[in-house]
Amino acid sequence: MSTPSPAWLAAARTQFVTHFGAAPTRFAFAPGRVNLIGEHVDYHQGFVLPAAISQGIRALARPRPDTLVTLRSATFNATHTFDLAAPFAATSGWARRAEGIIRTVLADAPSPRGLDLFADADLPVGGGLSSSAASMAALGALAADLNDLPLAPTPFALTLQAAEHRFAGVNCGLMDQLAVLQGRANHALLIDCRDLSLRPVPIPPTWALVVLDSAIRHDLATSEYNRRQQECAAVLALLRARRPAVQSLRDATDADLDAVAPTADPVGLRRCRHVLAENRRVHEAVAALAAQDAPTVGRLFAASHVSLRDDYQVSCPELDALAEAAWQAPGCIGARMTGGGFGGSTVNLVQASEVRPFLTFVAREYKLQTGRDARVLVTRASDGLTRGEVP
Ligand code: GLA
């Protein structure tokens, strides 16, 4: 995703004019993301390797002469209107997140101007592909642009993260926001979640990126996500009491974990073992990608999935079935669950010449094992947020 496709622009412009009676002036496209490896480590100041993908959130806007904001969501087939000069209006769901990010971005504007907005998506909602971060990025960017406010990537990522905490109740790390804003075509991004530095890592051109959405969504995803942080925080407190240099799990060693094992909660300890091993796998995966070493990438992806399933316990039977089917499939380089888990998607690297037999095999196995159909997104690593004037 980089510039609006003429077909989408023509259709979206028509819907905008029908709804608002005037033409849009600006667009924003925010991609979703997959994480190749480094799962549930961003909020432990670890290392992650996400890529922005070619599917995402697309939005159009025009300024208004007053302080009203009207958002038409094609995805939810619904409209939300609020007044920047009046108290917060939305109570839940997508409208609360949208209103939250727009108000946050405009909080420092001396006299904020309202806007008309239209948004749609070619990204599954709640599929573990950062549809939430992407929609906040697109809407927040348009609110800033129409109010002549500057947006620098890292501060904007932090604003988006704070909005996710506040308006969605998920105490997420910063991986999704940085990937959505800073993605690079044909590359994954190695992000150090302590200093927020970022290094593009090329994805071999003959390796296709395939996302399989299990079509499973679990309500407990948010509460379990936040609970994992508490479980790890309890062990971290023991680690720090013994060795104060351990600021986060990123600084801990296996020997540190062994030393606190007699007093730590065994479940918390397993969570932490995942974090330490996953951080190591990220560095090994970066080296393996550079060497185009498919067997090593496959081994690392599988080890990551198994660790998320057994130690961090954020997978579900359907994600396991999808990953296991992929491991047997022709052309598979690596497959694992991606994102927060409890449903959502797997990320698959597949030999580009074998995508078709790969998909046929996995679809058949998934159906056999679960009775369900997976949703397929053949995608590619793409640029992050793009925005500009409507041509
Ligand atoms: C969600 C969060 C991210 C990250 C992943 C798991 O996508 O938003 O910050 O923690 O889960 O790696």
Image (tube, helix red, strand yellow):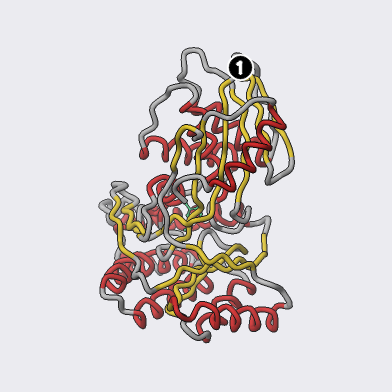
Q: Residue at x 25, y 52 (%)?
A: 245
Specify whether residue 311 is in view: no
Q: Can you tell which quarter of the image residue 185 is in?
A: bottom left
Q: Can you tell which quarter of the image residue 264 is in?
A: bottom left
Vertical placement of residue 323 versus 217, above or below: below
Q: Can you tell which quarter of the image residue 200 is in?
A: bottom left
Vertical placement of residue 45 versus 71, above or below: below
In-image side of 77 versus 26 (left or right):
right
Q: Residues within 10 Å of mark 1 (few under 14, many from 20)?
A: some
For mark 1, what is the residue?
Answer: 67
Q: Residue at x 72, y 32 (%)?
A: 18
Q: Position of residue 145 (x, y in %)?
A: 46, 28
Q: Position of residue 23 (x, y in %)?
A: 61, 28
Q: Position of residue 30 (x, y in %)?
A: 49, 45
Amino acid tagged 1: Thr
Vertical placement of residue 344 versus 226, above or below: below
Specify whether residue 206 is in view: yes
Q: Residue at x 44, y 44 (%)?
A: 385
